Image: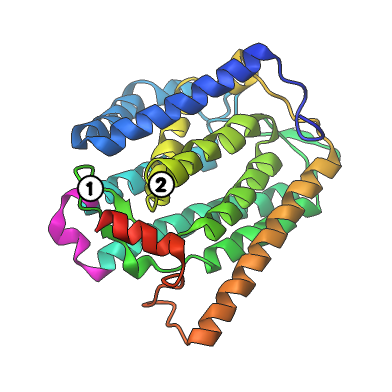
C-alpha cells in the first residue's frame, strides 16, 4: 500500500471487500424499502443504545469508541438518515423550503465536527505520534491544512434548493447540483481527516467507507450521494460502536506512521478544495448566482442526466 499503509495479505483484502459489499448491500436495503430504513436507522439504534453501546462504547474504553466525538457522530449520522426518510416519505415536508435546507445543514455540521477534530489533534502536540483517547494520532501541519480544507468544503456546498424526491418506487432524495467535483473533493478531504485523526482505523472508516457511498453515487443511484453517505456512515458507526475491536484486533490495517503520508494526504485535500471553491466562485461571479437560491451546475451533462432520470 505504499507510504500510507502496511502490507495487506489475502485475508485482509477479503475482509475489506466483505465490509465494502456489506455496507453497499445494507445501504440498498435501507434505500429500497421504507421498512428497511425504519428497522436499520430507528429500531436498531434504539435497541443498541439501551442494551449494547453503554458497554461497548463506554467512556475510556480501550478502543476509543467512548469519546464525545464518536457518540456525536453516531447520532448526527442517524439524524440525517431519519430526516432524509422524512423528506422521502412525507410529501408535504419536502415542499417546505426550510425542510430541504436541513440536509445541507446536517452535512455542514458533520464536516465542521471533523474539521474541529483535526484542529484538536494538532493541539495535542503529539509531533512524533501518541495514543490519545486510545487512538493513535500524530500532530502536525497536516491537521491545520486539512481542517482548512474541511471549512472550504463547507463553503462549496451548493444547490440545496434544488433537492427533490425521485419519482420511482424507491423515492430517493436527489441533490442534482452535488456532482462529481464536490464529491471527489469531499472524499479527498474525508480520507485525509480519518488518516489524521483515527490513523490506524482509517483504512476502513476512510477508504472503504468512502467507496461504499461513492460507488453507488456513480453507478447505482446517481444524484443521491448524500443519502448514500448518511446511510453507509450510520451503518459503519453502529457496527464499530457494537464491535469496537474490529479495526484493532479482528482485522487491523496499520498506517505506516510516515509524516510524508500525513502531509501528502492533507496537501492533496487542500489543493482539491481550494480548486473547487475557486471554480465555484468564478461561476457565481460570472453568472451572478444567489448561493441561497440558485443551482450552480445546471449547464453540465451530469446535472441534466440526474434530473432527466429522476423526474
Q: Is residue 198 above or below residue 100?
A: above
Describe the element under mark 2 as helix, strand or loop. helix
**Percent of width and height locating residue 28:** 33, 33
In the displayed structure image, the side of residue 270 where residue 77 appears, left or right: left
Q: Which is more N-terminal, label 2 or label 1?
A: 2
Can residue 274 be seen? yes
Please provide the residue range marked out in magenta.
Answer: 88-97
Q: Is residue 157 above or below residue 237?
A: below
Q: Can residue 176 be found in the magenta stretch?
A: no
**Percent of width and height locating residue 230:** 41, 44
Q: Residue at x 44, y 77 (%)?
A: 291
Residue wearing tag 1: 171
Describe the element under mark 1 as helix, strand or loop. loop
Q: Residue at x 38, y 21 (%)?
A: 52
Residues under numbered marks 1 and 2 in contact, where contact means CB atoms less than 8 Å apart: no
Quadrant of the image for the C terminus? bottom left
Q: Main secondary structure of the magenta part?
A: helix
**Percent of width and height locating residue 146:** 69, 55
Q: Nearer the viewer, mark 1 or mark 2?
A: 1
Residue wearing tag 2: 76
Q: Is residue 258 above or below residue 301?
A: above
Can residue 41 be seen? no
Amino acid at each position: 500500500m505504499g507510504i500510507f499503509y502496511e502490507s495487506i495479505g489475502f485475508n485482509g483484502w477479503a475482509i475489506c471487500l466483505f465490509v465494502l459489499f456489506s455496507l453497499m448491500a445494507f445501504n440498498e436495503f435501507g434505500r429500497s424499502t421504507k421498512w428497511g430504513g425504519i428497522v436499520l436507522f430507528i429500531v436498531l439504534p434504539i435497541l443498541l443504545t439501551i442494551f449494547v453501546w453503554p458497554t461497548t462504547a463506554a467512556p475510556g474504553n480501550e478502543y476509543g469508541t467512548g469519546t464525545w466525538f464518536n457518540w456525536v457522530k453516531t447520532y448526527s449520522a442517524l439524524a440525517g438518515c431519519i430526516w432524509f426518510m422524512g423528506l422521502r416519505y412525507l410529501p408535504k415536508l419536502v415542499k417546505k423550503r426550510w425542510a430541504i435546507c436541513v440536509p445541507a445543514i446536517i452535512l455542514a455540521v458533520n464536516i465542521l465536527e471533523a474539521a474541529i477534530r483535526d484542529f484538536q489533534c494538532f493541539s495535542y502536540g503529539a509531533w512524533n505520534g501518541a495514543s490519545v483517547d486510545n487512538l493513535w494520532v500524530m500532530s502536525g501541519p497536516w491537521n491545520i491544512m486539512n481542517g482548512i480544507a474541511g471549512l472550504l468544503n463547507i463553503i462549496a456546498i451548493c444547490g440545496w434548493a434544488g433537492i427533490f424526491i425521485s419519482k420511482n418506487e424507491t423515492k430517493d432524495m436527489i441533490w442534482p447540483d452535488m456532482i462529481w467535483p464536490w464529491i471527489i473533493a469531499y472524499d479527498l478531504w474525508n480520507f485525509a481527516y480519518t488518516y489524521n485523526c483515527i490513523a490506524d482505523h482509517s483504512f476502513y472508516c476512510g477508504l472503504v467507507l468512502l467507496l461504499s457511498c461513492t460507488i453507488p453515487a456513480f453507478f447505482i443511484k446517481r444524484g443521491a450521494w448524500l443519502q448514500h453517505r448518511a446511510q453507509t456512515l450510520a451503518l459503519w458507526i453502529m457496527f464499530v460502536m457494537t464491535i469496537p475491536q474490529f479495526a484493532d484486533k479482528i482485522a487491523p490495517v496499520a498506517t505506516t506512521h510516515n509524516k510524508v503520508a500525513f502531509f501528502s494526504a492533507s496537501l492533496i485535500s487542500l489543493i482539491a478544495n481550494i480548486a473547487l471553491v475557486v471554480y465555484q466562485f468564478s461561476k457565481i461571479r460570472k453568472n451572478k448566482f444567489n448561493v441561497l437560491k440558485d443551482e450552480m451546475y445546471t449547464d453540465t451533462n451530469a446535472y441534466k442526466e440526474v434530473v432527466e432520470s429522476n423526474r
